[in-house]
Amino acid sequence: MPREIEIWFTEFQDHFYVIAEHSSSQWVRNLRADPQVKIRIGGRQFPAKACILSKEAQAALVTEIQSLSERKYGWGDGLVVEIVPTVQISSE
């Protein structure tokens, strides 16, 4: 059954990133079970695939996203999730 949550995100190089404060959050468990998602930003809605980034294997990207989130929202600690649109999107 589809679920909808409102969550703060960071956009970087045509991908979207969200940070989970707790890796045991229900929405994180849902993404691990099925990474296919649909996201809505303003009036745009599109399919995407979510991937939990490895702090070890993708350290530079994780650090960059946490830094961007820190500047944008005042916090950036937690599990970084990358959301990659599976269709080309245009900014309207």
Image (cartoon, grey):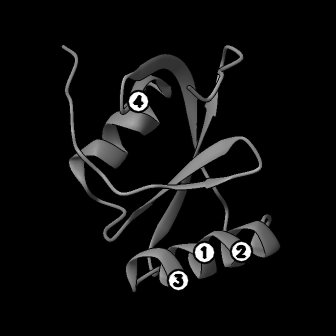
Given this view, does label 4 or label 3 mark the residue nearer the observer?
A: 3
Q: CA distance from mark 2 to mark 1?
A: 6 Å
What's the residue type where badge 4 is placed?
A: Ala
Look at the picture and state if 29 lies above or below 49: below
Residue placed at 71% from the left, 74% from the top? 64
Judging by the rendered image, the residue that carries numbered circle 3 is 71
Q: Earlier in the sequence, mark 2 or mark 4?
A: 4
Q: CA distance from mark 2 to mark 4?
A: 26 Å
Residue placed at 67% from the left, 62% from the top? 54
Q: Secondary structure at mark 3?
A: helix
> Is there a contact, CB below 8 Å, between mark 1 and mark 3?
yes
Q: Quadrant of the N terminus?
A: top left
Image position of 71 (left or right of 57): left
Q: Secondary structure at mark 1?
A: helix
Given this view, does label 3 or label 2 mark the residue nearer the observer?
A: 3
Q: Earlier in the sequence, mark 3 or mark 2?
A: 2
Judging by the rendered image, the residue that carries numbered circle 1 is 68
What's the residue type where badge 3 is placed?
A: Arg
Mark 2, residues whose alpha carbon is within 10 Å: few (<14), some, or many (≥20)?
few
- Residue 2: quarter of image: top left
Q: CA distance from mark 1 to mark 4?
A: 27 Å
Residue 75, given in percent of the width and then of the height, sits at: 40, 83
Look at the picture and state if 78 lies above or below 27: below
Residue placed at 23% from the left, 45% from the top? 6
Q: CA distance from mark 1 to mark 3?
A: 5 Å
Image position of 44 (left or right of 16): left
Mark 3, residues whose alpha carbon is within 10 Å: few (<14), some, or many (≥20)?
few
> Is there a contact, CB below 8 Å, between mark 2 and mark 1?
yes
Q: Secondary structure at mark 2?
A: helix
Image position of 36 (left or right of 41): right
What's the residue type where badge 2 is placed?
A: Glu
